[in-house]
Amino acid sequence: METTATPGTNEDSGSYTPEARAETRSELEADIEKFLQSGGKVDEIAKGERADPPRKPENNYGRGSI
């Protein structure tokens, strides 16, 4: 049975190697540059801002069918 390693990991220890991280980082930078050159835009979100505000907990005890 053939196993494939996750890209960027060392098969023996399962840890990321510096070389693999550098390769992944350069791929990510290239993807970001391509996105920006094709008209993409990056919006900065304020720290602590959430898309979904916290909700009040619901009490569903005893509402289910038997």
Image (spheres, rainbow, N blue to C red):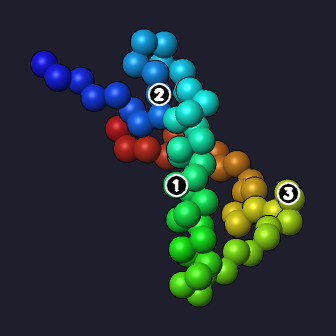
Residue at 52 percent of width and 55 percent of height: 27
The residue labelled by disc 1 is 27
Residue 55 position within the rendered picture, expressed as x and y whole percent measured from the top left:
72, 57
Along the line of sight, the residue nearer the viewer: 66 or 58: 58
Query: Does dot 3 land on a helix, a strand or a loop?
Result: loop
Instruction: Mark yes or no: residue 64 visible.
Output: yes
The amino acid type found where label 3 is placed reads Gly
The residue labelled by disc 3 is 48
Crowd tier of the residue under label 1, counting other residues whose Cα lies within 10 Å: few below 14, some 14–19, many 20 or above: few
Q: In the displayed image of the protein, which residue is found farthest to the bottom?
A: 39
Q: Is residue 4 left or right of residue 54?
A: left
Asked if 22 appears above or below 34 in the picture, the reply is: above
The amino acid type found where label 2 is placed reads Thr
Along the line of sight, the residue nearer the viewer: 29 or 51: 29
Residue 1 position within the rendered picture, expressed as x and y whole percent measured from the top left:
13, 19
Instruction: Mark yes or no: residue 60 visible.
Output: no
Asked if 46 appears above or below 11 in the picture, the reply is: below
The residue labelled by disc 2 is 9
